[in-house]
Image (spheres, coloured by chain):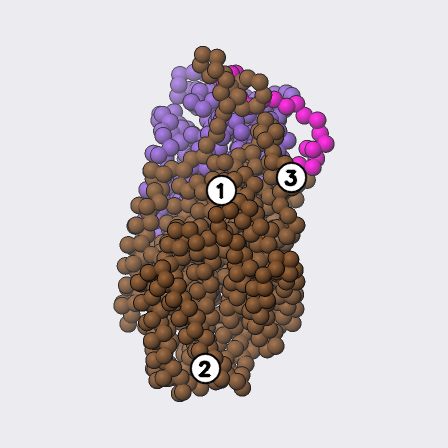
Chain colours: A purple, B brown
Amino acid sequence: MNLNDIILAIEKNKISLIVALVYIIFAPIIGGLLAGIDRIITARMQNRVGPPLLQPFYDVFKLFSKKTMWINRFQGPFVFCHLIFMICTGALFFEGRDILLIIFMLSVASIFFILAAYCTSSPFSIIGAERELLLIMAYEPMILIMLVGFYKVVGSFKFYEIILSGKHLILYLPGVFLGFLYVLTIKFRKSPFDLSYSHHAHQEITKGITTDLSAKSLAVIEISHWYENVFLFGLIFIFFSSFNWILAIIITLFVYFFEILIDNTYARVKWEWVLKSSWAVALIAGGGNIILLYLLNIK
Amino acid sequence: MEFIIFLIIFPFILSLFLLIPSEKLRNVLVRVGSGIIIGTVIIFAFFYLNKSPMYFHLEIGKILDKILFGSEFIIGIIILAICIKHKKFLPSLFIILHLIIMTYYEINYAHEVKVDSYLYFDQFSIIMALIIGIIGTLVCVYAIGYMKDYHNHHKEVKDRSNFFFFILFAFLSAMFGVVFSNDIHWMHFFWEITTYCSFILIGYSKTEEATKNAFHALNLNMLGGLVFSIGFIYLFANYHTIELNKIIALKGTIALLPIALICFAGIVKSAQFPFSSWLLGAMVAPTPTSALLHSSTMVKAGVFLLIKFSPLLQNTVTGYMIAIIGGLTFLFAAFIAISQKNAKKVLAYSTISNLGLIVACAGIGSYETVWAAIFLIIFHAIAKSLLFISVGVVEHKIGSKDIEDMDNLMTRLPQTTIFIVIGISGMFIAPFGMLISKWAALEAFVNVHSIISPILILIISYGGAVTIFFWTKWLGKIISINNVEQSKMPVGKEMDFDQWISLFVHGVLTVLTCVAFPLISMFAIEPYIHSIYNSSHGLGRSNVIIMIIMVMLIILLPLILMTLQKRKQFHQKEVYMGGRNVDTFLKFEGSMGVKKELNNKNYYLEKYFNEKKINDLGIWLSLVAIIIMLVGIK
């Protein structure tokens, strides 16, 4: 079945709410599985066997069974709000709402995460939080430029409308895609841009922004990260949605593989480099692309 | 019409009574008078917000013209005397020039002028009246408590607080005049009064710095006022009208030079680059002054004027240059705000930055951007005023306005901190007002078909990201909790009743406008936009629903969770410090067994966001834009 038909059916029967529900239920499963695959691929790249596919789930279940320690009573609410807003972000995205609004929602989710770290007064958490803020500042311009690019080509900020337009977005927006790919490394929390916290064991600021989270709160952060990843896959998917949709999914997965490759081949860089380079890439590749669209008045 | 005249005259009469040297009487008068003004603007808005704009002719208009001219002269000479006393050459020159121009106008043109309607109101001026009437008076009420504290803290400053209140209310009166005058000559008169009032307020403490900054503000705003007067005389000489509605009706046929001249004054007053320095200098004044200048008066007069003229600016070089100046100011002021430690300076730069966005919207002048601009004015006025007055409370309590001294504020001054949190959230967190407007502005810029559009989009993308950075780190600072500090809590209450009521109403209004923004849009802003552009803008219904859900979520969720958490017992642990924690919180064992206390500091990135460098760059770039705006007109 053609993707367009499916989406038309979704739009027509107003079952986009069901898609959102599907996201809420299945996103952590998909996200967890992808995390498992990530760990296996990473292990193979490092000549290790790696954990079983379901290891991320085992980890989270184990975290849930542990006793949670809190620094103060604000931490829990902030972490929980982070999860709720992250779920809302993805659910509204797959429900087909204005992506611009959804990106703002994503920032709210991140802000709650940062506040959860700030409220502890812990040195490592606060450094992690500050770095997370720097990262937000680094990637945010590119994301907004990308959405404007979609709008300029398609005339809409909505997921389904963009996909239904059938425009080959990747051909209109190669620069924007390049820029997005660059900041995607930040969003997937991959090296060289994993400044605020990393999945790898060793980091100069221990576990950065998550240092003072434990057991359940840590599990919640992990799950919300899975939700976020699936949402990001949706964003990558948009660029290739005009092709055969199986192909589009394969390309999306390949992009993820590419990020894993980068993760394993580059060492962490300093924040100056992250900020400068992402802003420059956003300006030159993303901004250049948008300015060209306006100059050539491509519709 | 009675309402308008009452709103212009009443604060002024009240202000005269405030000069009576009795503190008790003064406080009562301020409270009662503020109540009357608030009541009047609310009743006024209630009855007239859904009516079409009304224009009023005054029988005694001609006589009032003469009276205005006379008082302009008298006030001018008083200010001139002050300038000469302080041996300030430049402002004296400006005032003399100003008086010469006004006399020239009076002799050559005044007798020809035939004005059909001197005063008017439409939805936009009613919105402005609500902002001035409610936020402005609340600041005055706050000032009752603040000025008492202020003189306890600053013994060296002579207590002239009665005079201070006199100027505050005269200021409000002039602001009502600006927003209700249809005769541009009248508007200019009130415009100059606001300049003089801010000059006196900034110089209140009479210290060397205050005097210097006051004259700086006077210089720039007098320059703006001069250019303004040249603009409207030029208008009259060529188009034989100085009525606002008639000029705006000339869209398409009117020459842009006079409009550019008048907009120049708007740019100066709204503290855009290259003129932003006066607003920063104004920070030396007591906090109510800053709150007033930044939120409901002065700078808002500047953007009010620009938005009024913005239909004429649509698709013109002048308009584009104004948009560029606004855009640059938005971006650069946000950059500088990152590197600022002083809370008041962060607020000042964020004001300049937000005004930049409003100016950019006004310069584009499409109905979507005007919609966004008016919303920005409303939300910014409330949230910024709230932030200023709460920082004022903090400053008096902890004796510092440095953000780095504000850790643990949540346990030290819980009430005030909650108000600051509301204010900061209002400034940048998603469903709250400022962000809705930023979002609307971005959507509006995308639809502009000009090369200016991608430039503004880039500016807003970067500026938005920077804004998140500097607000969140401040927010993080004040909510970071460390239990040891509880012993350092100041004794006594946080603030007196006048201050509390002012903060409280501000806080409620911040939240209320966020929840009620679809109603504000529907009943106030859309009718106004419709009356000018014949087409209107609103957010889509589905978006409105999401946003209301978001507002509810973001307000209720943390509250509910925190109350739930309050009852629960939990296992408390200490923060991770490499296992070197000693005693209680935030002490660790250093080398040689020395106990050290931990100090967390925020990032300020001064190397990259250097105040001076960025300021200089902004000034030069915007100077170029201003020259193109004034010279490059077809």
Tell me the CA gap for discs 2 and 1.
47 Å
Can residue B326 be seen here?
Answer: no
Q: Quadrant of residue B524?
A: bottom right
Which label is found at residue B492?
3
Quick check: do tags 1 and 3 share a chain?
Answer: yes
In the foreground, B546 or B73: B73
The image shows residue A3 at horizontal and vertical percentages of: 50, 46
Asked whether disc 3 touches disc 2, contact meaning CB atoms under 8 Å apart, the reply is no
Q: Pick the residue in front: B246 or B277.
A: B277
Residue placed farthest to the right in the image? B567
A255 shown above or below B155:
above
Badge 3 density bin: few <14, some 14–19, many ≥20, Cα 10 Å: few
Residue situated in front as seen by the camera: B204 or B49: B204
The mark closer to the camera, 1 or 3, is: 3
Q: Residue at x 37, y 70 (%)?
A: B228
Coordinates of residue A242 in the picture (x, y in percent): 43, 47
The earlier-in-sequence mark between 2 and 1 is 2
3D distance between C-alphas at marks 1 and 3: 20 Å
Q: CB of mark 1 within 8 Å of CB of mark 3?
A: no
Q: Is residue A176 left or right of residue B436?
A: left
- Residue B92's spot in the image, x, y percent? 33, 66
Q: Earlier in the sequence, mark 3 or mark 2?
A: 2
Q: Is residue B16 above or below residue B246?
A: above
Name the residue type under label 2. Lys
- Compare marks 1 and 3 and give the one earlier in the sequence: 1
**SS at mark 3 in the image:** loop
- Please identify, in this view, whether the residue under mark 2 or under mark 1 is nearer the observer: 2
Q: Which residues are magenta?
A: B562-580
The disc at residue B66 is 2
Q: Residue furthest top?
A: B592
